[in-house]
Amino acid sequence: MPSGVVSIASTLIVGYGVRRTSNRWAWLVLCCIPSIIGGGLMSFATGSKGAQLAGIYLVNAITATLIIIYQWTSANVAGQTKRVISLALISGSFSVGNIIGPQTFQAKDAPAFTPAKITVMATQACAAVMTGVLFLYYVWANKRKDARAGVVDAIEETEEHKWEDQTDGENRTFRYVY
């Protein structure tokens, strides 16, 4: 029950925060931090059952990243076919992760399951790092596009041009959001 409360609360907080600040990358990293702490508590606080339980609850903060990842992906991919394929790959990746994740909990590691808990912590840390790398890439790509084409106003984009099926590389007015 408390795990669900953490998932729901983090999702609502993140949804509100992204709407107010638009810093998707920062909210993704922010969601990873409690999960990293939770993975650490589960892995290394072996003497305290309360700390381990808190770790289990904290790991559920990662649920909120799902809404940001889908939204961030669709906002940063232009072209209908490319967008659909990108979102399908994201969905498939989550599915594969949900299949592989439980397999890290091997019977030979019972009852502590330390390798699996460290894997939880490591994957959350990698997610935070990759979010930072993606943010830096988007900033760099936008600066590169601005330097090549000059800063383009949104007003310059006509209604006809807006609905053309161009990829983010082809559309000179497209800029990544972060």
Image (cartoon, grey):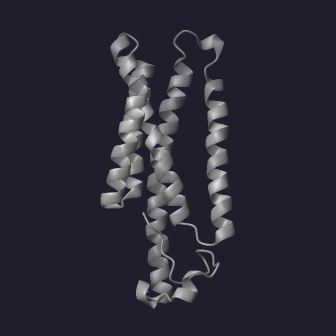
Question: Residue drawn 50% across and 57% down?
Answer: 71
Residue 151 visible in this rendered orientation of the protein: no
Find residue 166 and report its horizontal and vertical position in percent.
63, 79
Side of 142 where 104 appears, left or right = right
**Residue 58 percent across, percent down from the top left:** 39, 29
User: Residue at horizontal 50%, vertical 89%?
Assistant: 158
The residue lying toward the viewer, choosing from 21 and 108, is 21
* 90, above or below 103, in the image: below
Residue 53 seen in the current view:
yes
User: Percent position (x, y) of residue 140?
Assistant: 46, 70
* Left or right of residue 71, residue 37 in this image: left
* Identity of the residue drawn at 34% across and 14% down: 50
Q: Quadrant of residue 111?
A: top right
- Front residue of 136 and 14: 14
Q: Position of residue 117 (x, y in %)?
A: 51, 24
Instruction: Spot the residue most to the left.
Output: 20
